[in-house]
Structure formats: structure tokens, C-alpha cells
Amino acid sequence: MRRTFLYGLMTALLVAGATTAPRAQSRTQTLVAVLSGGSEAPTVINTGAHGKAIITIDPDSGEVTWAIDVFNFPTGLTASHIHVGAAGTAGPVIIDFAPTNLGVSGPFRLSGSTRAFIARPAQGIRSMEEAMVAIAAGNAYVNVHSQTNPGGEIRGQLCPAKAGDNQFNGIATCTPIPQ
Ligand SMILES: [Cu+2]
């Protein structure tokens, strides 16, 4: 009787552990980018505009969220995205923020979330998970486009606070920005 009770108790504990353990750890990760014209590539943009982007990625839900504060934007907003690519290079769009406030200038905020990504097989991006692996490593950047500079007015490399913060493999290809 005692044996049966103990086995039953152990089984109950194991089941409880198995169902709660994966939920206990959120894989959500936050990345920050400081946006400036000087970070645009291949051509640097001389502008007083600047900004800060805070991006959250959640591999479990496949959701990317953003909050981007922009200041001194001289001409109308035309688009904003996450592009894949290292600092100093221009790469293709992988996440479209699809701003609804197109045409705004001055200070403004973009915010939203999406589960949509744009596949870029040539850059190794074939799934949202692979898009997030690139973002988590600092191999992606935020770009905000204007009427005057349709290729990008301000840009910033997304980077984890510390290299080890990359939940996928602990690598940061960028220079970490303290958060
Ligand atoms: Cu873009």
C-alpha cells in the first residue's frame, strides 16, 4: 500500500513538472536600435531626424512587436521595416511595420505587432523562426523611410543588451546597446 502511494505521488509530481516546466520560461526577447541618418547604408543621410526602436520577439507565438519613437522627421513617412543585414550593408525587408500614419513628419510613434514575415531564401530567411534568429543575433536593422529619402531616412542595427542574451545561440554580431 505504502509503495503504491509513493509511486502514485511520484507520478503526480513528474506530470506536474512536465506540464509546468516549458511554460515557466518565456523565450520573449527585447532588442533596441538607435536610429540615425549616419547609420544608413550604402549612402549616409545628413539629417536631424533620429529615433529609438524597441522590438520584442516571441518564438513561441511567432509574434514581433515594435514601438518606435521618431523625432525631427523632416518629410512625410513612406514606410518602415525590419531589414536583414549587417551594419553598413543594405539588405531586404523581412518584417513590414505597415504604418497607418503614412505622411506624418516631426515627432511620431509607430507601434504594432505582426506574425507575418517576408521570406528571403538568399539571406537564409525561410520562416519566422529564422527571421527571429537573425534579429536576435543583431543581424537585422530598423529603417524608417521618408519622401525625401525613400531608401531610408534613419536606420539602426537591432542588438541585444548582451551577446549572451541571444536566446537561440548566444551570439551577437552587433555592438550591444545597454538597455
Ligand atoms: Cu525599409
Image: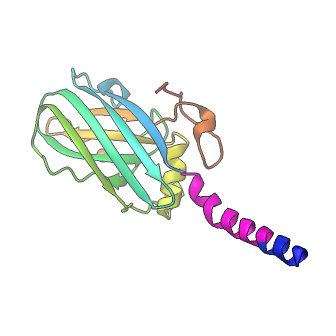
Q: Is residue 106 left or right of residue 179?
A: left
Residue 28 spot, x, y in % from top left: 49, 49
Q: Residue at x 37, y 47 (%)?
A: 82
Q: Main secondary structure of the magenta part?
A: helix
* Picture layout, residue 161 above or below residue 25: above
94, 97: nearer the viewer: 97
| Residue at image coords 49%, 64% | 127
Which is nearer the eye, 146 or 134?
134
Residue 64 within the segment the image draws in magenta: no
Tell me residue 27's x, y (percent).
54, 51
Kindly give the residue lying farthest to the front in the view shown.
1
Q: Is residue 41 visible?
A: no
| Vertical side of 50 occupied by 105: above or below | below
The residue shown at (27%, 26%) is 45
> Total marks drawn?
0
In which image quadrant can residue 141 be found? Answer: top left
Rendered-image quadrant of the N terminus: bottom right
Whether residue 159 is visible to the viewer of this picture, yes or no, is yes
Residue range in magenta is 9-26
Q: Quadrant of residue 150?
A: top left
User: What percent of the width, then of the height, locates residue 105?
Assistant: 11, 34
**Can you say whether 147 is above or below 118 in the image?**
above
Residue at the spot 63% in from the left edge and 36% down from the top edge: 164
Instruction: Name the spot of residue 39 as percent of width and height, x first.
Output: 37, 28
Magenta region includes residue 13 = yes
In this picture, residue 106 sits left or right of residue 161: left
Q: Is residue 54 left or right of residue 138?
A: left
